[in-house]
Image: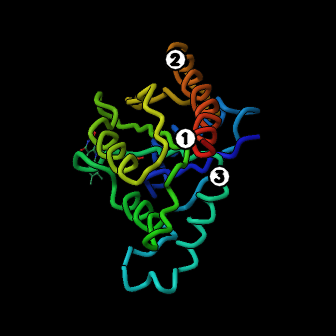
Amino acid sequence: MKKILVLVGSNRKESINRKFAEALEKLADGRLEFEYFDLAALPMYNDDDVAEYPASAQKLKDSVAAADGILIVTPEHNRSIPAILKNAIDWASRPWGQNSWTGKATAVVGSSPGAMGAIAAQIHLRSIMVSLGATLMTSPEVYLQMKPGLVDENNDIANEDTRAFLSGFVDRLSAWVGVAQERAAA
Ligand code: FNR
């Protein structure tokens, strides 16, 4: 089964983005295997530490390398991505010349309690990942407004239309892994 490394840009216990990721994982059951990386394990990026990479940052680079695809689930903090997520992206982009994101099948989604569904954060994130050479899945775009009860205690999506739309997203992500691998080989 294709392995997807999931980066959730929140370390909050009750994170709605973590919940959203778990709902996608359930929709992908039998199609994709999700592995979550704990972004809180990473120290704050410091270029002085690059010569001797911190173990957690090396683990992130190894996890990115081992994954068939990356799914980033971002909250929005002050109209951009949370610092914890940017920190992880920066770590895996280094050392110079060993950017882990190059050619990686990458998809971006996000959620907010507000109607805009983390759109500003996702636009920034897309721009960052393109600049790093990730093979970014451009559509469908997913700006999820997380309303109470939308994802239940079993991680099922209550709304039928939303469930069908997100199932289509999972299909596309699964296919995108193959597209990125073909591009990397070309
Ligand atoms: C927010 N939140 C927020 N929401 C939004 O839609 N646009 C924004 O610009 C911001 N800005 C913002 C800044 C900071 C510092 C915090 C802590 C929060 C609200 C945010 O969407 C909400 O807290 C979500 O619950 C965050 O996602 P997680 O942590 O639950 O996954």
Q: CA distance from mark 2 to mark 3?
A: 30 Å
At mark 2, the secondary structure is loop
Query: If you read the primary sequence from the N terminus, does the residue marked by circle 2 or circle 3 appear first?
Result: 3
Q: Residue 82 vs residue 108: left or right?
A: left
Point out the frontmost of discs 1 and 2.
1
Point out the frontmost of discs 2 and 3.
3
What residue sits 66% from the left and 33% below the top?
A: 26
Q: Residues within 10 Å of mark 3 (few under 14, many from 20)?
A: some
**Which residue matches tag 1?**
21
* Tag of residue 159: 2
| Badge 1 amino acid | Ala
| Badge 2 amino acid | Asn
Q: Can you tell me whether the CB of the residue at mark 2 lies under 8 Å from the nearest atom of ligand 1?
A: no
At mark 3, the secondary structure is loop
Q: CA distance from mark 3 to mark 1?
A: 16 Å
Query: If you read the primary sequence from the N terminus, does the residue marked by circle 3 or circle 1 appear first?
Result: 1
Please identify the residue farthest to the top as the structure is shown: 161
* Tag of residue 67: 3
Residue 172's x, y, as percent? 57, 27
What residue sits 56% from the left and 65% below the top?
A: 60
